[in-house]
Image (tube, helix red, strand yellow):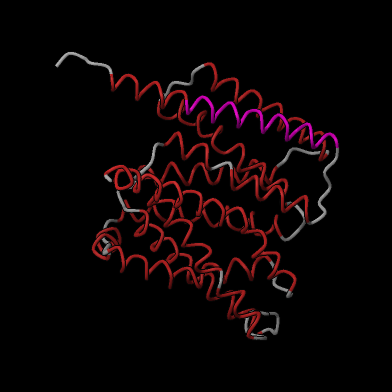
Amino acid sequence: MSEPVATSPARAAFLSAVGCYVIWGFMPLLFMGQAALGFSAGEILSHRALWSVLFAGALVLLAGHTGQVRAALGQPRTLAWLALATVLIAINWGLYVWATTHGATLEASLGYYINPLLNMVVGLWLFRERIDRWGWVAIGLAAVGVLFQALALGRPPWISIALALSFGAYGIIKKRVPVEAQAGLFIECLLLLPFGLVFVVWLQTHGLGHAFATPEAFGWALLNGPATVLPLALFAWAARRMPLSTMGFVQFLAPTLQFGIGVATGEAFTPLRAVSFAFIWLGAGVFAAAAMMRSRAAKRALAEPGLV
């Protein structure tokens, strides 16, 4: 009878991780739905900033982290780092919304495939972290994939690179700032709120806004709030309760779903692009397999009797 109780937290964490990456994977459909009603990328981004504050605030109240919010707002250094994180996540959101509403979902998905591999290079550069031979193999395969993608597009895949860099840099800052994920997210949304609110008001006063035209349009706009906050909350909860190697494997679910949406919506998938993604997938597979092997080796090492 004790086994289900013991495995239940691990199962719940795994399901939370799957849930957050599934939501992120299907996010292009939310933006495409708004674009079909006439929303521009800027209007979508503005409503994302606008409604995320309400849901992020509710999350802070539920988690009991209001004290952390007050403390962070009173620390200029912490607030400056969170402001930089806000700029990076705004760039990331804006690029992603633009890509998914302008027929570049495949290129966007590539960015999230290479992001964990890019994180390894950043870890080596900034934190002197060690990369084993399988890590270098994964990075090399991804680099070849990016090269083929550039040949397929006739230009460097700037959207992919910018998405990977902005989200990677955002993750580094969030790792170093001593604020819980929920409190940090609320402050970031709070910092974005004035820009989102001003742009929404400007659109409405100039007759260019679509969010308040019909109940359907307003519903789509409102969905930006929970769609932004819920997966981040699930991610934060899961990341504290499951091995990073497992998270590293599950994270490829999101770009895979994004890739499927890009193909299903008719984006060009040429043979050269197929070769590009084959190298990317192979690199991702090597990365995930190596992470699992490291996790198992660490467990075996802990299980072996040592000096006490």
Q: In which quarter of the image is the C terminus?
A: top left
On screen, residue 68 versus residue 300, left or right, reads left
Residue at 63% over, 42% down: 111
Q: At which x and y percent is residue 122?
A: 49, 31
Magenta stretch, overall SS = helix
Establish if 159 lies above or below 135.
Answer: below
Is residue 86 part of the magenta span, yes or no? Answer: no
Q: At which x and y percent is residue 60?
A: 33, 65
Residue at 67% over, 65% down: 41
Establish if 13 lies above or below 214.
Answer: above
Q: Nearer the viewer, residue 198 or 116?
A: 116
Residue with the most extreme left position:
308
Span colored in magenta: 271-292
Q: Which image quarter: residue 67?
A: bottom left
Residue at 54% over, 50% down: 21
On screen, residue 172 versus residue 275, left or right, reads left
On screen, residue 100 versus residue 80, left or right, reads right
Residue at 38% over, 43% down: 175
Establish if 148 lies above or below 301.
Answer: below
Q: At which x and y percent is residue 210?
A: 68, 80
Query: How many numbered circles does the render carry?
Result: 0
Residue with the most extreme top position:
307
Q: At which x and y percent is residue 108?
A: 67, 48
Is residue 273 part of the magenta span, yes or no? Answer: yes
